[in-house]
Image (cartoon, grey):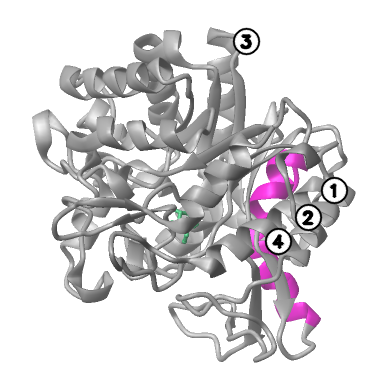
């Protein structure tokens, strides 16, 4: 069965997504402060091939061309993130007017093309000035984040309606402060437990700050939502990995509690704030699903203190260009398990879903049949779940800087030549365009 737009309700939100550090470049342009990713990328060995987001897709200068392509694609919503240190170079205090003007022009351009901005406030580029004071480990981050929310409201309130507070708390805390694979590159158990709790607290405080300022905002937050599978039948190990990826952030925000396996550790690491509120009546939840993650027990090390880690999926699974397993049915399983744990009342949006392939331009075209098949398979699952799933944002609109993998891993609907910065829409771009345009 071929999936069509008619399999979805007319008001289903169709979009695509990117983030600031992964696409903007302009890392020191016009008064922008440094972010933790600027610093991390400059650390030898931190990112594959020493790649950096200094230029990335240069969308800071080429956003009009990008938005023109977006409008050709036919989406009506675009999820992008604000770079906090572009707006507040020191994280708090003085505002950088050039950064504010940039995002205003950006959103003017989107709106001029009939595309609604879905703005993510935090997609990992914390101002380095705040990291110098402890970053996500410091409970003061809650006040810093609230100030940032207020500034965003004051500067961009007229443009805003749909707001994603924080992109993937698991990656911010576990990858950034737990195992140190991402910026700021800290590998420490207490740092993980503190940063995770503070991210959860910021979702609560950010939500209420924004809703108090404008009750009509539609404020949600996005979670990494892999379906965790154990490779060797070790359910305890899989549960720990599921907590590190999913439950340590979803449980507090949705239920107000930490999973039993971690509750006492969170309390010990956060003695003064553990009873502060975290349960948040989000207006929507963003789910970001790429595929199942297989895990297995390993010897605990200083960098891997819980003794559970990734392992390759079985050979029977299709793998993408980064070796990740693919299984669209696990998206359904994830959504059903999420709803059985937290109920069905909160609208869900797929704020990221996509796959990297080894794309190449040939005669001005990029043939990416695997991406089209991935797209169709995942949309087919979602078409059965539209009572709760209200929108879909393909990740990514364009090839970009894939964090610790550098420029390996092309997720885009639009191919980017990272030397010439030329953009070439892939076959999947035209597939999505045709899907959206069909009556
Ligand atoms: C992140 C994106 C990233 C994507 C693919 C998500 O974890 O939000 O920034 O590019 O996954 O790895």
Do the numbered discs 1 and 2 sit on residues whose CB atoms are within 8 Å? yes
Residue tagged by mark 3?
A: 216
- Does any portion of residue 121 appear in the rendered image? no
Relative to 70, 371 lies left or right: right
Relative to 375, 400 lies left or right: left
Relative to 136, 105 lies left or right: left
Which quarter of the rendered picture does the C terminus lie within?
A: top right
If you read the primary sequence from the N terminus, does the residue marked by circle 1 or circle 3 appear first? 3
- Spatial separation of the CA atoms under disc 1 and disc 3: 29 Å
Q: Secondary structure at mark 3?
A: loop
Residue tagged by mark 1?
A: 384
Q: Nearer the viewer, mark 3 or mark 4?
A: 4
Q: How many neighbours does mark 2 have within 10 angstroms: few (below 14), some (14-19), or many (20 or more)?
A: some
Residue at 64% across, 72% down = 326
If you read the primary sequence from the N terminus, does the residue marked by circle 2 or circle 3 appear first? 3
Where does residue 291 sit, x and y in percent of width and height?
A: 64, 67
**Would residue 246 be counted in the magenta stretch?**
yes
The span picked out in magenta is 235-257
Do the numbered discs 4 and 2 sit on residues whose CB atoms are within 8 Å? yes
Where does residue 29 sit, x and y in percent of width and height?
A: 11, 35
Which of these two is toward me, 57 or 175? 57
Residue at 54% across, 63% down = 371
Residue 317 location, quadrant:
bottom right
Residue tagged by mark 2?
A: 381
Residue tagged by mark 4?
A: 377
- Spatial separation of the CA atoms under disc 2 and disc 3: 31 Å
Q: Secondary structure at mark 4?
A: helix
- Spatial separation of the CA atoms under disc 1 and disc 2: 6 Å
Q: Main secondary structure of the magenta part?
A: helix
Q: Secondary structure at mark 2?
A: helix
């Amino acid at each position: 069965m071929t999936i069509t737009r008619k399999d979805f309700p007319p008001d289903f939100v169709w979009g695509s997504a990117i983030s600031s550090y992964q696409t903007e470049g302009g890392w020191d342009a016009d008064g922008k402060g440094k972010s933790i990713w600027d610093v991390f990328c400059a650390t030898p060995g931190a990112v594959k091939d020493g790649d950096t987001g200094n230029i990335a897709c240069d969308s800071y200068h080429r956003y009009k061309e990008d938005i023109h392509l977006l409008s050709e694609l036919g989406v009506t919503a675009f999820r992008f993130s604000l770079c906090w240190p572009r707006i507040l170079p020191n994280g708090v205090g003085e505002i950088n007017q050039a950064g504010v003007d940039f995002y205003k022009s950006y959103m003017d351009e989107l709106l001029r093309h009939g595309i609604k901005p879905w703005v993510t406030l935090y997609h990992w580029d914390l101002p380095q000035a705040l990291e110098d004071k402890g970053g996500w480990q410091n409970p003061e981050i809650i006040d810093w984040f609230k100030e940032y929310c207020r500034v965003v409201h004051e500067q961009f309130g007229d443009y805003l309606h749909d707001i994603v507070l924080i992109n993937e708390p698991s990656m911010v805390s576990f990858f950034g402060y737990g195992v140190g694979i991402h910026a700021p590159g800290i590998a420490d158990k207490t740092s993980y437990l503190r940063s995770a709790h503070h991210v959860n607290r910021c979702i609560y405080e950010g939500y209420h700050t924004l809703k108090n300022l404008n009750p009509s905002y539609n404020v949600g937050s996005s979670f990494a939502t892999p379906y965790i599978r154990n490779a060797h039948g070790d359910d305890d190990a899989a549960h720990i990995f599921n907590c590190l990826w999913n439950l340590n952030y979803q449980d507090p925000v949705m239920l107000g509690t930490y999973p039993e396996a971690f509750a006492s550790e969170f309390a010990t690491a956060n003695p003064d704030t553990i009873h502060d509120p975290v349960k948040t009546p989000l207006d929507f939840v963003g789910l970001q699903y790429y595929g199942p993650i297989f895990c297995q027990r390993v010897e605990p090390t200083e960098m891997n203190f819980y003794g559970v880690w990734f392992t390759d999926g079985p050979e029977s699974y299709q793998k993408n260009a980064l070796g990740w397993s693919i299984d669209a049915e696990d998206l359904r399983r994830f959504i059903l398990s999420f709803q059985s744990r937290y109920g069905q009342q909160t609208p869900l949006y797929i704020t990221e879903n996509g796959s990297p392939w080894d794309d190449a331009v040939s005669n001005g075209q990029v043939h990416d049949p695997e991406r089209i098949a991935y797209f169709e398979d995942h949309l087919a699952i979602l078409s059965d779940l539209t009572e709760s799933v209200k929108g879909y944002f393909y990740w990514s609109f364009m090839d970009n800087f894939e964090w610790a993998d550098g420029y390996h891993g092309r997720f885009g609907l639009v191919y980017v030549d990272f030397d010439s910065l030329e953009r070439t829409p892939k076959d999947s771009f035209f597939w999505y365009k045709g899907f959206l345009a069909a009556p």
